[in-house]
Image (cartoon, rainbow, N blue to C red):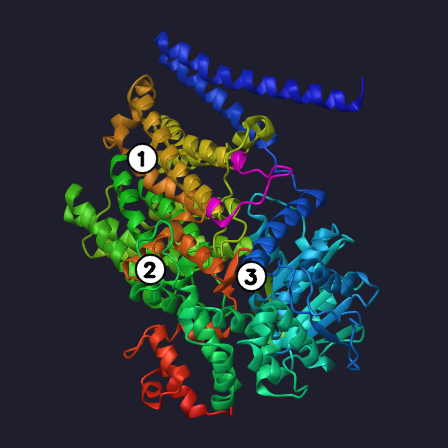
Amino acid sequence: MRESEVHTLSAQARHRAVILLVATAVVVPAVALALHQVELGSNLADIVAVILALLALVVSRRQRSASKAELRERLHTEMESVLYRDAQVHGLLRPELLPMRLLDRDGNDVWRDADGPVWTASEFQSHATGLVTGGTPGRMIVYGPPYGGKSTMALMMALGLLSEGRLPLLLNGSSWDPVRDSFADWFDKEVSSVLGPAYEYEGNLYHVLGHETHTVVIIDDFDALAAHAEQAVKWLEQDALHNRPLVLFARSGTIDPSVLPAGYAVRTLAPPKPDLLRKHLRQLVGKPAADGKWRPVLSRINRRQDNDVTALLSVPLFLSLARQVCGDPGSGLDPGRLVALVDEHGRISAEDLLLDEHVAMATSTAPYPGLRLGLDTPRGRWWLHNLAVMLRERKDRRLAWWELHTAIPAVVPMLATALVLLPAYQLALVMPLGLTRGLAIGLTAGVIMGLLRGVAPDARSIAVAGLTATAGVLGIGLFSLTPAQAAGDAVELGTAFTLTLACRPLLIRRRVLRLPLPGGRAWDVAGRVVATGAVALVACGSALACVVADGLGAEHKLGGGFWPILVSMATGVGIATMAGRMMAVDLSAPPVPCRLAPRVRGLLGSPLPYLLKAFPPVVLIGVMAGLTGIWRVNGMAYGVQIMIVFGLVLGVPIALVVGTVNWLTQPLPGEPAAAARTIRRGDRWAALGCVTAVALVAAAGIMVLRGPGHSLIKTVEEESGNFSVQPWQGILFGLTLGVVLASLHTAWPAVTVGQLWLAARGKLPWRTVTFLEELHTRRLLRRTGPYYQFTYDRLADVLLRCVDTGADPYDHRTVRLLVAGSPRDRRTHDGGERMARDGGAGR
């Protein structure tokens, strides 16, 4: 028998053995209970639970790391989908592109055969790809003027490489901080955002993919690193393989070539020659138009000398906008008036006017599907203005839809976590004594781990959220406890909540913390040790606050004291921290959406390994609750039975939900790339599924304990007198434990908080993904992977003028008056005042 067949048979045998054991775990205790053999049923259940726990710890294993071929296939699919969509939106696939001119270090033309008046998309891609595949040095930097076609060339180069079976990774340099991150770490973050969280891999992604001969790294907007260019180049020399292609694109004059090591080929994009530009424009507009309304422009270009009209139309962006605007009858601008405008006010003013008209035309089309208002309304212009402000304030000037919560005040998501403490505390009041307050702070700490990813807290936000949480706990406690006991719980939970917020950077830390010592030495502390110390700090601070409060008259239902409260808080925060660090890869970065899509069971395989992998939390929660119950309530029987309560009501929902989500989101070979809306919809359904599933399973567990399994928890009810939870209160578990799992596995909870805040204040529409996609379709935004940014930097300046106290900057009547040259009307318009002030000098 072959080895593969033996492996298959052994896997089938293990699978059947596990199924048989699980069935035995359910059937045997159930039969014993049906025969009223309560003690026997309890003992059997305990024995089987221990066996299942050991089995889960032995059988469960880390999800198989994706192979290089799987990673390459997935990235190729994603990049192809995103890049072709971007090229199609910006009209780069049409067969009439302006040929580009590329010079070497000595000023000679690199593309000597680029003499035709137009390029097709395939010709453009072939020329750009030849820079990588044509035997030139492996590393290259391409300089170019603003709006001179650098990003277009990078995009066409990537498309050409894709068509040849290579893997181009087009990255945006504006998101790299070389002072904080190495090139390999930044590459890992950027590519991981494209892959999604379902793909696990060993080691750094660049070390996995960089050794592939087909991988080509392309970094656009490298000029954004001008302030730290030397450090960025140092990282590239250290991390990037020297025998693999690397292409950088930067604005001329921003990155000194002397910073680059020897071996970099230097290329410069130059404007096309006037004769080629004239032929190109004449072929595009056709002979009748060339001899008619475009004659003034063509005659000016035909002078074969530098002038403002030639310089303006030599830029691909403004050539495209001039054709678009002059072809629109409503703009009031024709080619003859464009020439007159350049002569009277200068090239820069003409560029501003073309950008204004581009925005005006992009916002005057039909309203969005699903939105009641379009962009040609005051509210629509207000949305654009706020988006411009939001992107201008971000360091990398880009935004993914799952980062919306990072664009609002930090106090808002923190207040949202404070609200989760309220149902968690309500559960603590009806659950059996033992880990009740620890349960409340543990559930809230889990939400803090997940909901605040990517949020930078400050002292004021922490204080506001802490006071809100304390007041909420006090208000709920006054309805069920004495004022002294309510005050004691408010101090205990409020302090623990505030300290957890303050210590969150330490709780999630994975990197080594270097502590300076006298004599220039340093002590390196592992991230796990830092997190453990932070848990102890939260617990000690809460216990000390409770001791002080007890001295002032507060009380605790289980009795106060430093050590019992310290253990309770440490257990709750510790379990939440460990769960967060296990379920999320990077708790400091914004959450990445869960890519949940309709799957076929035959392709996914059996869910059992994923459920077994998620089973250990069941054991951990039950054991910790039992130990706390044994110590604080005194009694082995009570502790064992409280293990059953917490394991069944909390542990089982965790195992089922986490295991099912991991099973449904596993990567599949050949899976097509999903659109932004599809990813958003799948992420939303995954989050809602977590909340709903936890609520239903917890309610079922409570029904079992209230019904057939009532005798198993008899000691718990007798000792605590506090077990009054009802099946309908499974909703509370959904609003706490379900939100914990949703915030750690999906981006939807955090994004929803951001959307609610922005929509309530009217800053952005509720359907934000539709809004961003529509702006991309209208060529106001471009996409780099999952991120949106302005197509052109100066569009942000145009959009920031959307809201003013005078004339509407998109009023076509104003534009026509401006073009007509009326001084009175020109002074009433912001752009006209600027043109009158600047004259023809430019900026």
Left/right placement of residue 704 relative to residue 786 reads: left
Residue density around tag 2, few if under 14, some if 14–19, many if 20 or more, within 10 Å: many
The residue identified by callout 3 is 90
Q: Is residue 752 above or below residue 433?
A: below
Residue type pointed to by label 3: His
Residue density around tag 1, few if under 14, some if 14–19, many if 20 or more, within 10 Å: some
Q: Is residue 157 above or below residue 830?
A: above
**Residue at (36%, 88%) from the top-left corner?**
822
Residue closest to the eye, 9 or 108? 108
Residue density around tag 3, few if under 14, some if 14–19, many if 20 or more, within 10 Å: some
The residue identified by callout 1 is 633
Horizontal and vertical percent position of residue 536: 43, 53
Q: Residue furthest right?
A: 135
- Distance of label 1 from label 2 (alpha carbons): 48 Å
Q: Is residue 435 above or below residue 87?
A: above
Say which quarter of the image contains residue 737: top left
